[in-house]
Image (cartoon, rainbow, N blue to C red):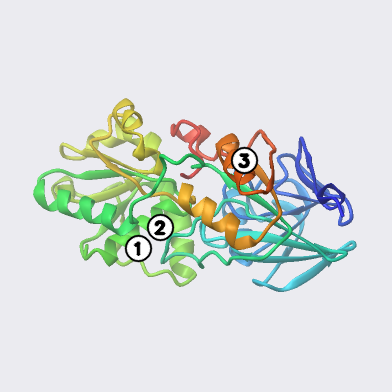
Amino acid sequence: MRAEDLLIPAAEGLYCPPGDFFIDPLRPAARAVVTHGHSDHARAGHGAVLATRPTLDIMAIRYGAGFAGATQAAAPGAVTRIGEVEVSLHPAGHVRGSAQVLMQWRGFRAVVSGDYKRAADPTCAPFEPLRCDLFVSEATFGLPVFRHPPALREVEKLVASAALFAERAHLVGAYPLGKAQRVMALLREAGWDRPIYLHGAMERLTEYYRADGVELGDVRKATGADRAALAGAIVICPPSAMQEAWARRFPDPVACFASGWMRVRARARQRGVELPLVISDHADWDELCATIVETGCSQLWITHGEEDALAHWATTRGLAARPLRLVGYGEEDAGDGAAQESAA
């Protein structure tokens, strides 16, 4: 069987003809399977959406309760028959509710990863390796230069800096969905027992994480907080807020940025980042390669990111590798001043 009989790359996203649905469609579709809640993958206006319960909740928070004509929550691993195809969702480890899509049809197994990471994250379920014939992977950090350090070690740098510069507030730029909550949880793991202050853009999603059972400790609104109390404080905000008047209310702030792109020091300098924190919610080069091998796939499609390097590596391993060059993914932060760095 040809992989294209089951899955077709299209301008709208990946289309499954025997199921008549799209995966993470970029424009309104009659039927969509959505991998996770970041806006470059989860968009409003579809006729029907199948996703995990957390992803549906996050879409409702971001777009309003009527974001789709109909919704269906899929439990992890539960099989839903759509047309001729058996579809199940399995943890991707990217953010809360993120899922890979496993499709089974006429004995052929295809997995679409969505965005994923292999590192431990206390705020979401870990990635579940799946055996398949076709693996469709992202490649945001698909170059050998990208090898992420342990995230806890990066957060320990932040805690040490806050202790060393006790008179200065530390502003941490982090994407509001997933990265912000992960940094908070890691701060608690690193021993930070003081309040964590939040920009208003973080509040609703953070409250959802807490209501869904994620322990984040004492979290407070930054707006209205006493200036003296913010000396030595850690404040988490969208990256764009660090360049706005909002940031000037804090005492001599230390500009920090939590992103896998902070591995590239030139990017940190360009953004005026004093303390770069290499914390990513995407797989790095070694993890991408190891995951592909673990799936046992014979065919690899690469949706977005550094496609050519990963495709070349896979070809040297004897796989039939194909970069799809899909446009529209990897732009989650485009409107947030983060240089199109998709919740990196």
41 over 107 or under it: above or below: above
Q: Residue furthest top?
A: 270
Identify residue type, mark 1.
Ala
Q: Secondary structure at mark 1?
A: helix
Is residue 302 in sight in this rendering?
yes
| Res 85 → quadrant | bottom right
Q: Label 2, on which residue? A: 181
Left or right: 35 in relation to 237 = right
Q: Closer to the observer: label 3 or label 2?
A: 3
Q: Secondary structure at mark 3?
A: helix
Circle nearer the N terminus (3, 2): 2
For marks 3 and 1, give the CA distance.
35 Å
> Foreground residue, 311 or 336?
311
Circle nearer the N terminus (3, 1): 1
Query: Residue 323: horizontal and vertical position, in percent?
Result: 67, 38
The residue at the point 34 percent across, 58 percent down is 184
The residue at the point 44 percent across, 48 percent down is 176
Query: Residue 34: horizontal and vertical position, in percent?
Result: 68, 54
Q: Label 3, on which residue? A: 311
For marks 2 and 1, give the CA distance.
6 Å
> Foreground residue, 299 or 192?
299
| Res 293 → quadrant | bottom right
Identify residue type, mark 3.
Ala
Query: Residue 296: horizontal and vertical position, in percent?
Result: 65, 61
Identify residue type, mark 2.
Gln
Left or right: 115 in relation to 227 = right
Is residue 284 in sight in this rendering?
no
The residue at the point 63 percent across, 54 percent down is 113
Quarter of the picture containing the N terminus is: bottom right
Return the mark for residue 185.
Answer: 1
> Foreground residue, 252 or 162?
162
For marks 3 and 2, give the CA distance.
33 Å
